[in-house]
Amino acid sequence: MRKAIVDIGSNSVLLLIAEKKDGAWQTIYNDYFMTRLGYQVKTTGILQQDKIDDTLRVLRIYLEKAKEYGLDSMSCAATMAVRMAENREEFLVKAEKQGTPVRVLSGEEEAAYGFLCIANDIILKDADTIAMIDPGAQSTELVIAKDNGGDRSEISNWDVMFSYSFPVGLLGLLDEINHVECPSDEDLNLLRCNIDNVLATKQIPKIPVNAITLGSPGTDMAMIQEKQADYNHLLMHGKILDRRFIRDMVHDLSSQTLVERRGIVGMPPGREGAVHIGALILERFLNAVSADKCYVTPKGWRYALLDE
């Protein structure tokens, strides 16, 4: 059995095609395009027309790719940018008409699926309590859960102590400093305070955790740390990032121009514009859960949708 899942994020659109063999899903194709669907949606409240058109174009490309793998359809889901957009129905109707219908995940669903995609991962097999951090372009999900025994792939076997989708994301923070190329210390302190203030609106449990970060920000940092010149993000699964390294990278990257960041060994193409902000979000969330380090995985909630 094969499935195609599409994650329509605020910054990028990701395709996962996987095949189930011997009871386990194996990835057979991955791809992504950066369409920035959520560009300025936090300030304007609407999805920009050119971003809608570009995202719809990518969905058509992905449908053709799915057909190459013997599939007639895909499961497409969108997150924060579409959730908050006043004109989301325009995007959803157009997607439906072209044969690529899109489901909009709630913040609760996004957090739960993110946790489930890593709950049974071998790199966390000895972890009793897990803190999952999923930084995105318009939101960041945090789940803290304790293993109750049994099948770890079932959420019912976890004591979920905290789960929330925070309105903190790469694009939103860049909007706050007018997308300045090299943020000053004052800019970074402003963003740091804003993130901490949002985190302070919720009572996050102060308990020992094994932290793991999903998606691009952590993977980007790991590729830079490992000097992964061939940009194979899948090789970053299970790597460990120290919070001090992430904090230092925020400062170092912010002091560099886009051209300079592009020249860093391991810098994934197209990530140079927001990599420092992603690192800042990750560092502040690790601080909030009192974790000095975290595991990295390129996985995202789309992996959990394979079992639906």
Image (cartoon, helix red, strand yellow):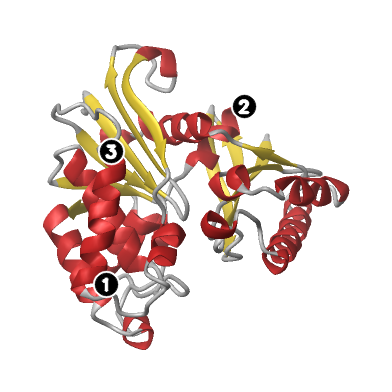
Identity of the residue furthest to the front in this view: 44
Location of the C terminus (image quadrant): top right
Residue in front for this viewpoint, 8 or 306: 8
**Total numbered circles:** 3
CA gap between label 2 and label 3 equals 23 Å
Q: Residue farthest to the right?
A: 97
Q: Secondary structure at mark 2?
A: loop
Q: Residue at x 29, y 35 (%)?
A: 201
- Residue 47 locus on image (x, y percent): 66, 58
Query: Disc 1 marks which residue?
Result: 227
In this rendering, the label closer to the viewer, 2 or 3: 2
Of residue 152 and residue 104, the one placed in the foreground of this image is 104
Crowdedness near tag 1: few (<14), some (14–19) or many (≥20) residues, C-alpha within 10 Å: some
Q: Secondary structure at mark 3?
A: helix
At numbered mark 1, what does the secondary structure look like: helix, strand or loop? loop
Amino acid on which disc 3 is placed: Ile
Residue kind at label 1, given as amino acid type: Lys
Residue indicated by mark 3: 123
Q: Position of residue 247 (x, y in %)?
A: 17, 61
Q: Is residue 281 left or right of residue 140?
A: left
Residue in the foreground of this view, choosing between 184 and 102: 184
Q: Which residue is mark 2?
A: 308
Quadrant of the snapshot with the N terminus: top right
